[in-house]
Every structure is written in structure tokens, then in C-alpha cells.
Image: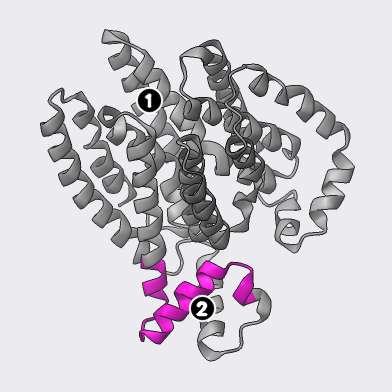
């Protein structure tokens, strides 16, 4: 079933080859109406045994429904509590919450794709985002998957000079999942007028990461004080260290190319490179604790994919087509790898 969904999203990629703008937009609208509807229903109506977090969400919802939810339940992620209350007062079950989160995630991803890249490459970028985030994000980590695209939208708005809207959207993202607060320093820099003209912004993170690794024990003590991070600091949270090593290598290569073409990048693309550097640095710092390292990579992976699309926009002729074909293959590999995290739950 998952590969049927993949094939559906893949069908939208050739739309990028249509030169007529009006015709391309018509095909895009038709494609996204069908695709988004299928994705939302598929993710929102999934069975309860599809991932390890589902039953926890149901129990959380039930505690709110019977009035036994603690203050931590209500305020740790205000958006989940609010959406649950709306569903309860409407006489709905948890399925309505799951459907709403799926819709919010998919729509936010599409909105970011339509604003962040050239219209021609929207379906290709959406395809890459789907391959990276659908199985391990929209299907499992529903709260984080609503927050991450909102965080990305906030940074885009900040780059566009819309400071108030940017701050508002970022606050909404925090209400869905506190983990995106790691992007607050980047957002603050952009809001203060930093334009990242120099490559030094990206390169400087390497020695900073080295210094941070030197103070590793202090960082672990700091994060251990938070109950929300304590679980991720379990070394056994995720054992696929080889995947993280491969991810780090690919991201580092992408960042290296971006630094070479730095002056050809827009402000938002430069912020994307810098954000990828932050995510990669944090992932490497916390690599022994793969759960936390993976989360940092996961938050900023929107920007790795955005860099890949930027390279498509900068290339020309047959090189562009060959590179786009390679991205399709890369997307399939990422998607197939992500399905391994759900293999033990079946329904693939």
C-alpha cells in the first residue's frame, strides 16, 4: 500500500517538465487535490498498531475526554490539547484528531513548497519532502510533523520581511511541538536583519561543533534535566547509527556544494544552508544518542532538500534533467529506507 502512495506522488514529478505556465498550474491543482486527499485519509485513518506512538496519543486523548489529564498533559503541547477538546466537544473520537493532524501536516508542507521554490519544481520538491517525511513523520510523529513545516514557513516569512507573521507562525509551531525551538536562534538572526552574505556563517559552525563536543558531558547534563529530552538521550532509542553516518556524509556534501555556489543563492536559500549546518552540527554532537541526533537532523531536513532543488534551478539543459532523475532515485532510496522503521508494525 505504501508503494501505491509513493507511485501516486511520483506521478506529479513530470508536471515539472511542462513549459506552458498556465497548463502546468492546472495540472498541479488537479494533482494536489487528489494527492492531498489520499495522503490525509491514508494517514488519518491508519490503524492503531501502525507505530509505537499511536496508543500513547489515544491514551492522552482519553485522559482529556474524561477530565483526568494533568497540567503537563494539557500544557506540554497546547495544540494537541486544544484540537482534542474541539474533537471531544464535537462528539468525535481520536480518529478526528489524527485526520486533522494529517491535514495540517500535508497542507503546511505543500504551502511551504509553493512558496520556497520556483513554480516549475513544486511537484519535485513535494515528492522529496514526501519521501523523507511521510512514513516516519506524518504516519508516526504527528505533532512534530505539524510543527516542522510551520517552523520552515516562519523562517521563509522572516526572509521575506514579514516579521510579525513570522513570529506568529513560529509561536503556533511551538504550540504543536516544543522541539522546533532549536530554530529560534536562526529566526532571531533573520529578524534582526542578518543576511548571511558571507560563507563564513556556514563554515564557522564546524569549529563551534568541535568545541561543543569537547564540552559533551556538560551538554548531556543540561539536556538530561529536561524530561522531554531524557528519553532521546537513551543510547538505545535508535540503533541505526550507520544510517546517521550516511546521512551526515550526504548532507555534508550538499552543504559543500552550496558553499561553492553561495553567491548565486537567495537569502532564503542561504538561510537554508546555514540551517542545514546547524542541524548537521547538532546531529554529530549527539550522534552517540541517536534518538536526539536524529531529531535534530529531522527538524532541519526541509532545508537539505531545498538545497537539492536549488541545484536543479541553477543547472541547465540536459544536466538539469539528469540531476532531476538522480533526485527521483535518491527520493526512492530515502522512502524505502524510511519504511524500515514501520516494517515491524506491518501494513506496508
Image quadrant of residue 252? Answer: top right
- The residue located at (41%, 63%) in the rendering is 101
- Looking at this view, is 114 or 51 the one in front? 114
Image quadrant of residue 56? Answer: bottom right
Q: Position of residue 41 (x, y in %)?
A: 29, 62
- The residue located at (56%, 62%) in the rendering is 175
User: What secondary structure is found at the residue carrying circle 2?
Assistant: helix
- The residue located at (66%, 37%) in the rendering is 241
Residue receiving disc 1: 327
Residue 45 seen from this side:
yes
User: What secondary structure is found at the residue carrying circle 1?
Assistant: helix
Q: Is residue 88 magenta?
A: yes
Q: Position of residue 309 (x, y in %)?
A: 39, 26
The majority secondary structure of the magenta stretch comes to helix
Q: Is residue 176 magenta?
A: no
**293 left or right of 87 in image:** right
Residue 343 seen from this side:
no
- Looking at this view, is 233 or 2 the one in front? 233
Question: In the image, is residue 283 above or below residue 204?
Answer: below
Residue receiving disc 2: 61
Give the total of numbered labels. Answer: 2
Q: Position of residue 168 (x, y in %)?
A: 51, 55
Instruction: Give the CA distance from mark 2 to mark 1.
Output: 39 Å
Q: Earlier in the sequence, mark 2 or mark 1?
A: 2
What segment is highlighted magenta in the picture?
Answer: 73-99
Q: How would you rate the neighbour count of disc 2 (Cα within 10 Å): few for under 14, some for 14-19, many for 20 or more?
A: many
Q: Position of residue 215 (x, y in %)?
A: 88, 37
**297 left or right of 83 in image:** right
- The residue located at (12%, 32%) in the rendering is 22
Q: Which numbered marker is on residue 5?
A: none
**83 left or right of 281 in image:** left
Amino acid at each position: 500500500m505504501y508503494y501505491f502512495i509513493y507511485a501516486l506522488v511520483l506521478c506529479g514529478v513530470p508536471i515539472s517538465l511542462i513549459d506552458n505556465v498556465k497548463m502546468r498550474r492546472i495540472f498541479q491543482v488537479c494533482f494536489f487535490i487528489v494527492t492531498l486527499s489520499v495522503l490525509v485519509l491514508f494517514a488519518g485513518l491508519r490503524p492503531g498498531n501502525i507505530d509505537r506512538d499511536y496508543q500513547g496519543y489515544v491514551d492522552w486523548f482519553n485522559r482529556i475526554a474524561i477530565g483526568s489529564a494533568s497540567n503537563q498533559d494539557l500544557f506540554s503541547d497546547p495544540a494537541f490539547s486544544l484540537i482534542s477538546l474541539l474533537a471531544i466537544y464535537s462528539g468525535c473520537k481520536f480518529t478526528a484528531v489524527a485526520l486533522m493532524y494529517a491535514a495540517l501536516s500535508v497542507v503546511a508542507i505543500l504551502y511551504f513548497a509553493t512558496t520556497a521554490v520556483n513554480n516549475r519544481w513544486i511537484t519535485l520538491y513535494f515528492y522529496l519532502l514526501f519521501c523523507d517525511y511521510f512514513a516516519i513523520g506524518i504516519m508516526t510523529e504527528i505533532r512534530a510533523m505539524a510543527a516542522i513545516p510551520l517552523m520552515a514557513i516562519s523562517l521563509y516569512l522572516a526572509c521575506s520581511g514579514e516579521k510579525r507573521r513570522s513570529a506568529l507562525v513560529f509561536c503556533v509551531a511551538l504550540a504543536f511541538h516544543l522541539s522546533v525551538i532549536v530554530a529560534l536562534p536562526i529566526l532571531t538572526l533573520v529578524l534582526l536583519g542578518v543576511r548571511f552574505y558571507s560563507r563564513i556563517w556556514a563554515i564557522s559552525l564546524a569549529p563551534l561543533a568541535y568545541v561543543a563536543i569537547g564540552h559533551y558531558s556538560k551538554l548531556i547534563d543540561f539536556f538530561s534535566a529536561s524530561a522531554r529530552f531524557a528519553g532521546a538521550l537513551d543510547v538505545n532509542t535508535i540503533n541505526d547509527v550507520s544510517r546517521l553516518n550516511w546521512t551526515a556524509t550526504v548532507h555534508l556534501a550538499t552543504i559543500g556544494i552550496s558553499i561553492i555556489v553561495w553567491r548565486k543563492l537567495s537569502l532564503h536559500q542561504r538561510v537554508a544552508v546555514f540551517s542545514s549546518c546547524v542541524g548537521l552540527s547538532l546531529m554529530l554532537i549527539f550522534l552517540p544518542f541517536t534518538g536526539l541526533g536524529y531529531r535534530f537532523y529531522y527538524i532541519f531536513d526541509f532545508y537539505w532538500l531545498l538545497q537539492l532543488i536549488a541545484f536543479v534551478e541553477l543547472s541547465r539543459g540536459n544536466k538539469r534533467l539528469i540531476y532531476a532523475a538522480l533526485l527521483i532515485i535518491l527520493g526512492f532510496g530515502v522512502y524505502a529506507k524510511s519504511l524500515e522503521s514501520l516494517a515491524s508494525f506491518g501494513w506496508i
